[in-house]
Image (spheres, grey):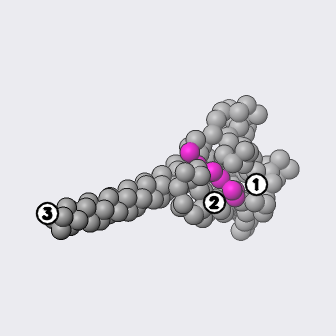
Amino acid sequence: MIVYVALIALLFIALVAVESQISTSERRARAFLDINSAAVSAFSRFSRDIRRASSIDTVNSTLSASSGKLALIMKKSDGTNDTTTFYLSSGKVKVDENGVYTGDITQENMEVSNLTFWKFSMGTSTAVRIELTLAPDATTTVPALNFYGTYVLRGSYIQ
């Protein structure tokens, strides 16, 4: 009887250890999915606004810096300009439209440690390269991941 109880206890201990490993793996997988989802969401917004822009306001932008700032100028059909500004503040990517804060484009549970913008001009067109480093909040052991994207300002070559 004691042997059977010991065997059942060993099986139970093994079962608890396996369950713990599965739970840890599931948390890490969910964190990786959350990071990728946050990156897709941010780059979707970057892509949309950069492609709509006619030029970059280099005076109000901070280019080639890890806490970068990108100010985009968009021409409206009536000839006036709209401005959209992306910047890093308190670990979140924030957006201002025409000087008014409109919100964060990164989720609450994500920490942004790097947001770098580079401007490239080639003849009549202008492009922006973005580097974004995302990490989940401190509840997981998932490392920060880098994401990259390059977008051409369509308005820069349309006359």
The kind of secondary structure element at disc 3 is: loop
Q: Position of residue 28 (x, y in %)?
A: 45, 59
At label 1, counting other C-alpha atoms closer than 10 Å, the crowd grade (few under 14, some 14-19, many 20 or more) is many
The one nearer the camera, 108 or 146, is 108
Q: Which residues are magenta?
A: 109-115
In the picture provided, is 56 more to the left or to the right than 18? right
Q: Nearer the viewer, residue 30 or 51?
A: 30
Where is mark 1, residue-wise? 68
Amino acid at the residue labelled 2 = Thr
**Residue 51 position in % (x across, y down):** 60, 52
**What amino acid is at disc 1?**
Gly
Q: Tag 2, which secondary structure?
A: strand
Dot 1 or dot 2, earlier in sequence:
1
> Which residue does the image show at 63% across and 40% down from the upper left?
104
Residue 114 as seen in the image, left or right of residue 44:
right
Q: Circles 3 and 1: CB distance less than 8 Å? A: no
Asked if labels 3 and 2 touch by Cβ distance under 8 angstroms, the answer is no
**Majority secondary structure of magenta residues:** strand
Decide which of 86, 49 is in the foreground and name it. Answer: 86
Return the disc, 3 or 1, that comes first in the chain's sequence.
3
Q: Characterize the local packing of mark 2: few (<14), some (14-19) or many (20 or more) Cα atoms within 10 angstroms.
A: some
Q: Report x, y in % for residue 77.
A: 64, 35
The residue that label 2 is drawn on is 133
Image coords of residue 44 (percent x, y): 53, 50
What mark, if any, has residue 33 been given in the picture? Answer: none
The image shows residue 72, relative to residue 157, as above or below, that is above
- Could you tell me which residue is drawn at 55 percent across and 51 percent down? 139
- The residue identified by callout 3 is 1
